[in-house]
Every structure is written in C-alpha cells, then in structure tokens.
Amino acid sequence: MSMRYTARSGNPAMDAVTTRGLVKRYGDFTAVNGLNLNVPAGGVYGLLGPNGAGKSTTMKLLLGLVSPTSGDMWMLGRKLGGHHRIQPGLVGSMIEGPSFYPGLSGLDNCRMVADYLNLPRSVAPSILKQVGLAGHEDKKAKDYSLGMKQRLGIAMALISDPELLLLDEPTNGLDAEAVVEVREMIMGLSRQRGIAVIISSHILSEIEKMASVVGIIASGHLLYQGSLDALREEGHIDLRVSDARRAAAILAANNIDPQLVSDANGAVLRLPELPDDRVGGIIARLVERNILIYRVASERKTLEQAFLELIEGPQYHEDRQSKPSTRRKAFSSKDGGVR
C-alpha cells in the first residue's frame, strides 16, 4: 500500500522520531508494515487510525517494549536497536492506559517513579499540580475518577522532564468535560515546555484540535503524513447558469476548460478552485454575453470524507479480510472517530 500524500523526507538528527521501513510481525500477522515516520521536534504529532491499525504497536516499538522484525528507528537524534537505548527519563510514555499502584496515593505513585529515575522526591507535588491534581495528592489512585487517573498517568510520564512524550489514546473513555481538560493540558505542555508529543487516537476530531502534523495508518500501513488540512483534495467551483453549454463554449474560447456535470436540475459548469479575482472575471464575461448566473458554489471535501476515502481504499479492505480476528468497526460522524 502506498501513501497518497507524503511529508518532508525527515532528518533523524533533527527530528524527535524517524523510522525507515519499520516492520513488526507476529507469526503470519504483520502489525506494522514499512512505516516511515517523520515526527518534528516540538509540537504535537497525531498518530491516527482505526482500532487495530498498529498505533500501539508502533509506540511499543519506539519504547523498546517489543523488538522490530526489520527497519530502523531514531529517537531524539539517537539510533535505536541492539545495544542502543535511550537514556531513562528522556522519553515519557503512557501506553494502553495509565499504569500505577491503585493502593498508593497519587503523590506516592509519582514518588515511586522519581525513586526509580534517581530524581528528588520533591518534584512529585509540582508535577501533580501541573496536571491539575493539586488537592488530590493524598487520595488513593483507586479512588480517582477516570479523568484523574489519566492525569496521574501523564504526571508519571512527565516527572523526569522528558524531551519526548508518547501518549496512547489519552482521552479514551473520558466524558466530554474531561476530554477538553486533558486536551488543553497536553497542548499547554507542548507549548510551555517545548516537549514533542506523539498522541495516538482513533478519534479524528480530537487529533484535529491538537496536532499540527499527523500520520494516518490502517492495517499497519502508513497512508498519509502531513497536515490534516492538506489531506483534503483541492475543491471545485460549480456554476449554475441559464445555458450551460453556451457558457462552456464561451469559457473554452477564453482558455478555460470547464466540466459539464449533469444533475436533476440540468447541468452545471464545474471549474477547479480558482482565485476570487479569476472567478469574478469569469462571471463578468458570462454576464456580458447574456448568460444568467443562478448560483456559484465552492465545494471541498470535509476531513471526514477525505479520511474515510483514505482508510477504506481497496488495499485496506483486502488487508482487513485477511485478518479475521480483527473486527472492522465503522467511522462515526457523531464524534468524528473510527470505532
């Protein structure tokens, strides 16, 4: 499967994360298939795709929790793999939900991480305050709400003041208010502390609000990398006029080649997206030739439409059919997510 779009080639020495031909197989099952990621240093990078697309596996590969079948990885300018490991504390992570001791308080959970990393315990209260858990430090983690547990997981990932933060579905299962709070917290961390953040999600609307650059994967393949806005194809302009065929002939004589599109109300002239001054000139030219302009409409694909077309191409269906244990779940326009 080839990408329809591509971002810059990337520089392993400058980017937060770079991968080349990254593959992970489990027997006959290929979870990650030839990923070429370019994650800029600083800002939020969204790893977007349906459930089972390979997002969590990709993060586990970057963290060294599983070993790649083939391919190369660089993180914070350092080559990974073999004896090459990232120094503890440079990367913070929360994979497949927060991990903590439920019988310990939020403060003691953070202190435990500080001890492991040989950091002073005094950093724990300030981190909890930063993620919005001030006043709840002594409450046991098992008594936290789901949103508070997510915040605690992020606090434990941040305690070492990392240069890179990997968050796997950080808003999963949260109510609407908690989603907004966690989202704003993540964006604030990136802006204020200059941390590069990689967030995986199946919810398009959430990634759209946070990420400046995205990578979209399905069935282990990277389908797109770049800005979400660039994902949408160029739009078009439809002109509904009194005589579409004569109008088309007039425009053709002026080196403009419109497409005639038939619909229930007759025919319209379809033009590529053009600057306003050119559209104004076209309309003026037609009016001079006694062509009535009934309607001018500029149309462009929504992000949902572009995303659906991207992940539901022929190759995507072939790959899903070859994986009977993975149930395909539909895209929901209600919350902008892939379920």
Image (tube, rainbow, N blue to C red):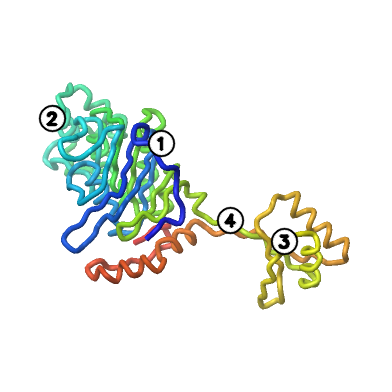
Pinpoint residue 6: horizontal percent, then vertical percent. Answer: 44, 49
Say which of 246 and 181 sits in front. 246
Task: Name the residue beneath numbered marker 1.
Answer: 43
Say which of 150 and 166 sits in front. 166
- Mark 4 residue type: Glu
Q: Earlier in the sequence, mark 2 or mark 3?
A: 2
Q: Are marks 1 and 4 in contact (CB under 8 Å)?
A: no
In the image, what residue occupies the spot 22% across and 53% down?
24
Report helix, strand or loop for mark 4: loop
In the image, residue 74 sits, relative to residue 260, either above or below, namely: above
In the image, what residue occupies the spot 72% across and 50% down?
276
Judge from the rendering whether residue 50 lies leftward or rightward of residue 226; answer left or right.
left
Judge from the rendering whether residue 135 lies leftward or rightward of residue 218; answer left or right.
left
Pinpoint residue 127: horizontal percent, then vertical percent. Answer: 27, 29
Per the model, the C-alpha gap separating discs 1 and 4 is 26 Å
Pinpoint residue 319: horizontal percent, then vertical percent. Answer: 31, 67
Q: Earlier in the sequence, mark 4 or mark 2?
A: 2
- Tell me if residue 173 can be seen: no
Q: Earlier in the sequence, mark 1 or mark 2?
A: 1
Per the model, the C-alpha gap separating discs 3 and 4 is 17 Å
Report helix, strand or loop for mark 3: strand
Q: Earlier in the sequence, mark 1 or mark 3?
A: 1
Of badges 4 and 2, nearer the viewer stands: 4
Task: Name the residue beneath numbered marker 2.
Answer: 116
Task: Name the residue beneath numbered marker 3.
Answer: 296
- Mark 3 residue type: Val
**Which residue occupies the extreme left position in the image?**
103
- Sort mark 2 into few (<14), some (14-19) or many (20+) by Cα contacts within 10 Å: few
Task: Name the residue beneath numbered marker 4.
Answer: 234
Per the model, the C-alpha gap separating discs 1 and 3 is 39 Å
